[in-house]
Image (spheres, grey):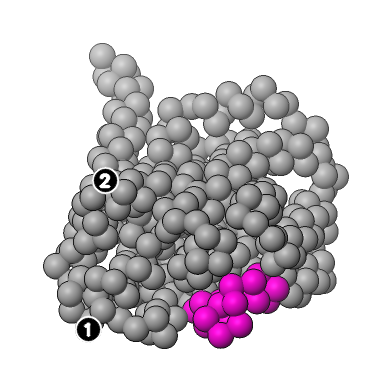
Amino acid sequence: MPLAVYALTAGAFGIGTTEFVIMGLLMQVAADLQVSLPMAGLLISGYALGVFAGAPLLTLATRRLPRKTVLVALMVVFTLGNLACALAPSYELLMAARVVTSLAHGTFFGVGAVVATHLVSEDRKASAISVMFTGLTVATLLGVPAGAWLGLQHGWRSAFWAVAAIGVVATLVIAMLVPADRDAPQASNVRAELEVVSRMPVLLGLLMTVLGFGGMFAVYTYIQPLLTQVTGFADVAVSPILLVFGVGMIIGNLLGGRLADRGVPRALIITLLALTLAMGLMTFALHSRVAMVLFAGLLGAAAFATVSPLQLWVLQRAGGAQSLASSLNIGAFNLGNAFGAWLGGAVIARGLGLEALPWVGALVPLSAAVVAWIAIRGERMRDALPGCADAA
């Protein structure tokens, strides 16, 4: 892989850390700002909705700028947003700062994924995407447990100060290593791009992404109270278990990229069903500490094995609107994040309790697998039509 791909990985690490770090700090934030646990969980939903809304808008607004310039500018926005989070005196201002920070997220991953695929040969595009997204998984492996530890030792604000420092480093690395665009930005037809991303295969891909990640976040958003209040772990055990989840994410992400290089449709079905199975079986592991550590790793692996197949499905069907479609799909990941955080909160608020989260969540990626089967079957039927017509 070219060094530029790893520079994008550094940016993905910073952004992934700020997205997920709040999950290991949820109880501290709720106590400090005097809000309920489901209300604190909405800080995750607010960030995710900001990504979903900001991804297409910023991608269209910056479409005529050099991609390297866009990536550096987005990292600056990200860094300033985390400084605002660290200084926020109230829940409302913390929510606003999280939303501002989130605006950089979708376009960075969307544009970055396109840049990564242009740096490698055709048969390594999915692997290039998976290497870039490894930054996201390493953020969960190192950034989130470190943030949870910092929050426990020095208060939750210290985690955001640390993330802002990561943002400064990532900005410098991208500025130094990512090559300048070879060609001048070409004016694009917004209407034509919107027509491309409104095609059914692209829309079904976005729906798969929302549903695939929605179920996982119904569990992962509330992983801290799930581990401490149901399984019986001490607070200090949460960080090491998040480390196990992060290891699983890295393994699953790289395996998903390899699998997608061999065929995206098959990879979609396999990874979505694996995620469904992992979450469904977690229901029976909730009261076993050993089993929950194991399933934390399995959940991370199964969830992030879906990333490259889902992203490449949309990219391959977007034609000349790859940056927009890629950013929309990152937005879809985060819409799934918001949906999952809301779904988990609704399950808790309606009295089903924390123990119901895994089996309720498992139904969501199962529905994504059904959508994938419909999309794949539809494409095969369309491909067969010319042959049928010729035969007739």
Q: Which of 197 and 245 lies nearest the eye of the viewer? A: 245
Separation of marks 1 and 2 at Cα, in angstroms: 29 Å
SS assignment for the magenta stretch, majority = helix
- Is residue 123 visible from the viewing direction of this image? no
* Residue 223 to residue 188: above or below: below
Q: Where 309 sits versus 249, above or below? A: above
Q: Position of residue 29 (x, y in %)?
A: 53, 65
Give the residue furthest to the right.
184
What residue lies at 72% left-to-right and 26% top-to-bottom? Answer: 189
Q: Which residue is mark 1?
A: 290
Q: x%, y% of residue 198?
A: 52, 27
Which residues fall within the magenta stretch?
145-162
Mark 1 or mark 2: which comes first in sequence? 1
Q: Of the residues shown, which amino acid type is indicated by label 2?
A: Arg
Residue at figure coordinates x 26%, y 79% from the top left: 232
How many labels sit on residues?
2
- Nearest the eye: 147 or 26: 26
Give the residue pinned by disc 2.
350
Residue 144 position in % (x across, y down): 52, 74
Residue 149 counted in the magenta span: yes
Which residue occupies 59% across, 77% down? 155
Asked if 139 appears above or below 115 in the picture, the reply is: below
352 vs 24, left or right, is left
Q: Nearer the viewer, residue 82 or 197?
A: 82
Q: Please state, as top left, top right, bottom left or bottom right, where the N terminus lies in the image.
A: bottom right
Dot 2 falls on a residue whose secondary structure is: loop
Asked which quadrant contains residue 219, the reply is bottom left
